[in-house]
Image (cartoon, coloured by chain):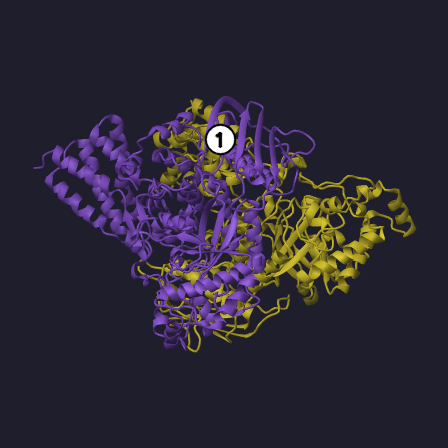
Chain colours: A yellow, B purple
Amino acid sequence: MNKIILFLLLFGISNEQIISQSKVSETFNLMPWPKDIKENYGKFVIDSDISISIHPETNGRVHNAAINFLRRLTTRTGVFLNEGFPVSNKKGSIQINFQNVSQLSIETDESYTLEIKDADISITAKTDVGAIRGLETLLQLTQNTSNDYFFPGVTINDAPRFVWRGLMIDVSRHFQPVGVLKRNLEAMAAVKMNVFHWHLTDDQGWRVESNVFPKLHEEASDGLYYTQEQIKDVVAYANNLGIRVIPEFDVPGHATAILTAYPELGSKDGYRYSIERFSGVFDPTLNPTKDMTYEFLARLFAEMTPLFPDAYFHIGGDENEGKHWDENKDIQAFKKQHHLKTNHDLQTYFNIKLEKILNNLGKKMMGWDEIMTPNMPTTTVIHSWRGKNEGLEEGGSLIAAAKKGYQTVLSNGYYIDRMEPVENHYAVDPIGDVKLTELERARILGGEATMWSELVTPLTIDSRIWPRTAAIAERFWSPKAVKDVVNMKKRMKHVSFTLEELGLTHIKNRAVILRSMTNNQDIASLVTLSKICEPLKIYARNEGGVEYKTFSPFTLFAEACVVDAEDGASFNSAVNNYIKDANSETTNLVLSYLKTWAKNHDRFEALEKNPKINPLEKLSENLSATAVLLESAVENKSFSKADAIKVKASLYVLSQPFVDVEVVILEGLKALTTHFESLYKLN
Amino acid sequence: MNKIILFLLLFGISNEQIISQSKVSETFNLMPWPKDIKENYGKFVIDSDISISIHPETNGRVHNAAINFLRRLTTRTGVFLNEGFPVSNKKGSIQINFQNVSQLSIETDESYTLEIKDADISITAKTDVGAIRGLETLLQLTQNTSNDYFFPGVTINDAPRFVWRGLMIDVSRHFQPVGVLKRNLEAMAAVKMNVFHWHLTDDQGWRVESNVFPKLHEEASDGLYYTQEQIKDVVAYANNLGIRVIPEFDVPGHATAILTAYPELGSKDGYRYSIERFSGVFDPTLNPTKDMTYEFLARLFAEMTPLFPDAYFHIGGDENEGKHWDENKDIQAFKKQHHLKTNHDLQTYFNIKLEKILNNLGKKMMGWDEIMTPNMPTTTVIHSWRGKNEGLEEGGSLIAAAKKGYQTVLSNGYYIDRMEPVENHYAVDPIGDVKLTELERARILGGEATMWSELVTPLTIDSRIWPRTAAIAERFWSPKAVKDVVNMKKRMKHVSFTLEELGLTHIKNRAVILRSMTNNQDIASLVTLSKICEPLKIYARNEGGVEYKTFSPFTLFAEACVVDAEDGASFNSAVNNYIKDANSETTNLVLSYLKTWAKNHDRFEALEKNPKINPLEKLSENLSATAVLLESAVENKSFSKADAIKVKASLYVLSQPFVDVEVVILEGLKALTTHFESLYKLN
């Protein structure tokens, strides 16, 4: 990433193309931003007479999407519609036309044209998938005056930049029931994502009913698995939303669950495998030297592949350190016999056999980037995930894969479980400024956000995925030039709110957690604290993989906090503006924060205490103490040496991580302190 | 209902038995209240070492309930447990013992004994169902100091008063997805309910996949139905919680959906049936004179009965007005030929044939009380629902049915869709003071709360069922003498909050609706308004059945309001206390309400307006105007004639129903006004 461009992005400074984006209208909250949009200054008023006609009439995706569109429009506007379903035999005020029903694949045409005029809206697309993408755009355009709701007159020509725009959900570390998946699929469709990568098995659990190897779900799932009917239901639900489903069965590593059920497949004879309760990278690994292993996988995959009609099939392949291989004399002998020098060579041997099995089943094998070894055929698909964190170049394996002839998908940079600010992910462009041939470019299919679930449960998963994933979706769909961070954040905030209409719980569950923490007392003081704290980032929370177990309480303060905390960046920037120019507007803004915080500790102290809220006392107390002194400095224009010492002591306390969160207004508080120290020349 | 008892109940005055209830401890938030509870003043501290052992070890209900217990305990206490699953081969600190695994039926023994000592807890029961009831009681006993969570030392001997403690959910008027049902089943189990009555078909939709008559789900469900796998999943889920599932297929009336798919079964030849979109009682009715009708029902029920293993099978049978029968000459001729004088006689003819079909399938037929005609065999089960509203005696058909020899279940008095205050339902005792023989008493199985879904969607259904249904559950479980309303309301409030832990949405979705109404602005002013308003009661909202359609917006202000509005009774009672004795405490309480409301309109006015919130302006404005004047009267001890006139004008506006709600603090506001008028002798 070019550092100057990064700088421009981070500070919201526009380049030429960004200006062309914001020229259209600041009032449009579209996300992802379309390829081409022109205003025609019309206005389509939404009233009871609105109706939809579809050509050709089908009972498929567009019919379903049209009904959902009408329900969501009714929710958003409160308008009582006369027609609750697409109309037949007459022209609706919204006309949808498409040519073909798509069998979902990476070839599916998702382009569409949307035209809104005063009395007439049309969506035209080559495929039904394009048409439903257009309907989502139309809904996002809903606006209102004080007296009516309307769609603004625009003409949009839109098509995605990448064909693979995915979200991976890990349902092994913490199982996610069907309802959680369905609402996240709806959210994905709302931001035009089209791949759901379903990480179905790992050390912590096997999650699919198997009739061929029933011990897998009976003994390695704690009863938390999907029946085959539920799998089919989710796949059909996704398909209806224009979303492909790629299953992942992670082998040969991350295999503790499989080996709990079938220890005879393991690399360590006589080892007593049991479902893993901690997070981390573990040793249990399938034994690649036994025929039995391949017979097992062949029969298992023969059972599983019909459940997942998509051509791509993910076999994981990551983080196999081969410790149990090294400890096994038979495996060592096998390596010698087959001239396999390293464990990588042995895994490649395994992968090549696996690919044949999958090819026989009509599937294209995909795996994490460890599978890209020199001997690996280019018919496999490389899922690039490693980067600086793993001692490699950011996204390097993606470009390397494309150049070597592999199709490839990027997840490095989109690890949303790292709890990084949205702009970090938004700034990651799969291709960047690398020069590629047309053929190489075509091999870069797109990217996937990854929701690893060590620290997320059904209660919190939505708030860990959304709204940041909407910005990543934009990176995958919109033209490369769309990258104004300030504008993106404004639109993301709106999209976030509208996702709640779809049943997403990322906003409402904060109050649930805080009510639970307080035993149903007034949560206002904790809400205030949660708006200035973020969960610890980049796995600091589970350092060493020893603290949290899968059944630990994920209902504490850190769970009520989210990345991009509401009052974090906004306070820090308010302080910057105040220091630059202390006019009444900038002063009042800073004061309003300080006053809220100054008062907050009294409210906190009024709570009946319990072991869950006790650890927050230090945070609450030091925040208020700091805010009181800084408020007084603003208002009374004085700041004594003693004040400075007190503030710094409090800031030191606030800067120490505790209850698994970090305070994100320290920058602003420190800047204010320094500012007052120099301004009022302490005495 | 004896009026004196009602008076005692409504004003929380205790009789002897109520005193015995509250003697134990005001701090226990048990609901339903157990049969017998004694304190032993021990204290079991909840720490990481808590563990559960189960004897005998099984993978069934108790194992499942124990795991859920540990998860919920972790959520509630924040304690990191060492053992996340029941322990084997050693004694847990919680020991569960039971004798038999129950096949659920009305014979199932649900009694249990729970004993909590300092270091040791035991739950002993005859059946596994009794054991899981005991686990719910234990969880409800969780208490805390500022430093720890603990279970108080008690010995509880408990058993239900009635064997049938049900909740009916209508999934026809508005479809409710599996997730909605599962979370409500969990809530039912949390308050020891044991029957889920599943109203699966009505004029507005057929909701079950049928392979024998596929047009039912294909043409009469709008695509909103349960697959047979989903039905089995829900039934198994309920069974695991000790809940029986009774399906209802409503015939011969409420049959528009069936006739939409198979019009040839209808009573009006050539009529074009289509799925009903409005609420009300409609004419389409099966034709009871055609053999085809019985062949259809026999084959349909033969397909459906295996999905529902319970012995009871509900055929509806209600509200058939027979208009289409009267209009059909062939049906008239048939009546003459078979000496059936009235339509009731014809329906009895139909019901008797139906009962034979069901008996052949091993089922006991149950129907709404219209089926209790003189010729109806006493092998059927009478579901009593009609009362004063229908020109009959309250619950009269229940006692009559028991005396005539029918098993019977009461729903009259438990229609939670009427949006009545909880004390109305709580006061309804299925038997009351009626003298019955032992045999007659045994025929009264219990009762069911009924959630008809004309006006509820998945977004709002929880807030229409809970928490009031917890109090009804107590009526069905606890001894008759447990009826202190004040104490019940205190406990219900706590139970309501804990239901949120199970995923119930009755609390959190208020904010969702208000955010949607405001387009994500500050909802504080609307929250204030929603706490003093309740949705219109007793079907006033859908008067005449013409306004709302199934696809109308159920996301407006009335949906954010609930019965037993938070600030309603509490303000009215605060005013009473203030008028009786205006000391500083009573004065401050009244003032705190008035000040909140006085300020509220400014906050409301700061909102950017839209068509959804515009109609609330009148409410907000008049509330604040009234509160300003009354606040001034309290503080300045003066109230002029002009003030009185202004207040009364505002109160008049507030007393008019609008946006489908009613203001529930009028009583208090009016009392204050009258008080000040007389106190300050207006000039």
Q: Is residue B417 left or right of residue A255?
A: left
Identity of the amino acid at label 1?
Ile
Q: Quadrant of residue A680?
A: top left
The residue depicted at 27 percent of the width and 30 percent of the height is: B588
- Residue B659: x and y in percent read 30, 54
Q: Quadrant of the C terminus of chain A?
A: top left
Subunit bearing disc 1 = A
Front-lying residue, B371 or A359: B371
Which image quarter: residue A498?
A: bottom left
- The residue that appears at 38% across and 70% down in the rendered structure is B339
- Residue highlighted by disc 1: A613
Q: Determine crowd level at label 1: few under 14, some 14-19, many 20+ residues with C-alpha closer than 10 A.
A: many
Residue B162 seen by the camera: yes
Q: Secondary structure at mark 1?
A: loop
In the rendered structure, the answer to whether residue A21 lies left or right of residue A633 reads: right
Residue A567 in view: no
The structure residue drawn at horizontal position 78% and vertical position 54%, both measured from the top left corner, is: A296
The foreground one among B177 and B606 is: B177
Q: Position of residue A281 (x, y in %)?
A: 71, 42
| Left or right relative to B242: residue A330 | right
Q: Is A69 drawn above or below residue B571 in the view shown?
A: below
